[in-house]
Amino acid sequence: MSGNMNLTLKVWRQKDGKSQGKIVDYQVKGISPDMSFLEMFDVLNEDLIKKGETPISFDHDCREGICGMCSMHINGRPHGPKTGITTCQLHMRSFKDGDTIVVEPWRASAFPVVKDLVVDRSAFDRIIQAGGYISVNTGEAPDANAIPIPKKYADEAFDAATCIGCGACVAACKNASAMLFVSAKVSQLALLPQGDAERKQRVESMVDQMNEEGFGACTNTGACSAECPKEISQVNIARLNREYISAKLTSDNI
Amino acid sequence: MNWFLKTFSGSIGRKLLMALTGLFLCTFLIVHLIGNFQLLKQDGGEAFNFYAKFMTSNPIIKTTSYLLYSSIVLHIIVAILITLQNKKSRPQGYVVSKNKSSWASRNMGILGTFILVFIVVHMKDFWAEYHFEDLPMYQLKDGSMVKDLYLEVFGAFKNIYYVGLYVFCMGAVGYHLWHGFESGFQTLGLNHKKYTPWIQSSGKAFSVLIAAAFAFIPLYIYFIA
């Protein structure tokens, strides 16, 4: 088909967490500009399987930008050259015929490589388990407007809640800091009355867990927000700092 | 006190120390600059030597100076601790990395190291000379005899290497402030649409003005005075 592309891929291959990895070159031919980046990988993996080689492992699930599974560092940027999208929403029309594309896994001590481009992001799950929830008795769904919430706060909480936990913020940050993720998860509850009861305990526990997982400190470079597929704002990090400082000054945890 | 130590050994607590000491040091730069402007008075050193005497004898200034020294030391120690942790957080780097952030924000450690080297040289040449060496004396208008620091500084600013180092390091100060000023407020949790644009623009103006004004004085003395 006309307009199809031939590309050189330089992909990080690593057998398992204990092995040394390296960049391996692959040629892919006849790639349609309408394919997504992950579909291009599917084509490459089909080729590898036919040749009897081990296909490249990569994380993916919904392929519509909402699950947060895909996690490729493409040509030096998490989720590739476009802003506000995940790798699965990146299309091959963003590249030119003959391009060389370097694909690496997220790099952070808290995100160890499992295999090839797959990293273990369960550190994020443990941060959520430390306090990213509200303790309520489940039962019948409450009335929609039983608790009045000004639209402004509902909107801000929702903006924070759009975080899909993909880890692009950690991948983009020169310090591998998870502050944008934690700030989004703290903010979505801190802004709402439902989150108020446990707010001090929550922020202290989640930040403690974040430190324990070995993420770096935030030096406010702003690279995380620039790469976040959901465009989570730096305002959330300031809110997290505020929540943390006020919790430290007033909570009962000695 | 467990909670206290835990707070300041965690990442946000450490950043809080960086912000508080950093912003305090910003106020010191203003005071220091006002003093340096006394060098521009063509009065044989009266104004600058009077200022030097005031800064080394006034009890409030002397007390504040200990707060200043400890702020500098704390800022450096905490910066090293944060940097070591941050390096540990990414043991393996990327083959290709196009980081979308300002150059200054990514290189605060390098800029800070230049500033530290400058502070050491600066303290050795002026502060230590003034306190521990026999310098020519100068008689102030009030009759008191003081060491002639003006002569010392003027001599240094007639040395092209010293002027070059000074101007280069003021560039490092400017870039350090370019990121550091607004970053300090963000770390303190102060980010709001009402005042953040103002903090950002005044931070940029502050960094340029401070660096330019400090660098202007040795250049003026070397080339014009």
Image: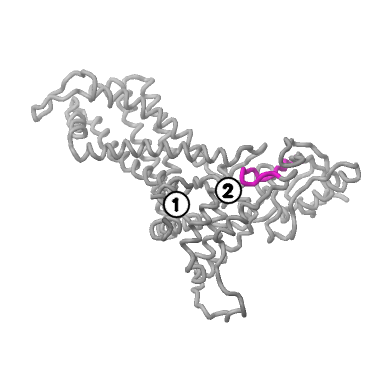
Foreground of the two, B14 or A93: B14
Residue B169, percent from left and from top: 41, 30
Q: Which numbered disc covers residue A213? A: 2
Q: Which numbered disc covers residue B175? A: none
Q: Which residue in the protein does label 1 denote?
A: B186
Residue density around tag 2, few if under 14, some if 14–19, many if 20 or more, within 10 Å: some
Q: CA distance from mark 1 to mark 2?
A: 23 Å
**Does residue A217 sit above or below B211 in this rendering?**
below
Image point (10%, 27%), residue name? B144
Element at label 1: helix
Q: Quadrant of residue A117?
A: top right
**Residue B150 seen in this snapshot:** yes
Residue A175, percent from left and from top: 55, 43
Residue type at tag 2? Glu
**Does residue B170 sit above or below B152 in this rendering?**
below
1 and 2 marks in contact (CB < 8 Å):
no
For disc 1, the chain is B
Q: Is residue A108 magenta?
A: yes
Judged left or right of residue B31, residue B169 is right
Q: Which region shows up in magenta?
A: A99-113
Most prominent secondary structure in the magenta stretch? Answer: loop
Judged left or right of residue A69, residue B76 is left
Image point (79%, 37%), residue name? A25
For disc 2, the chain is A
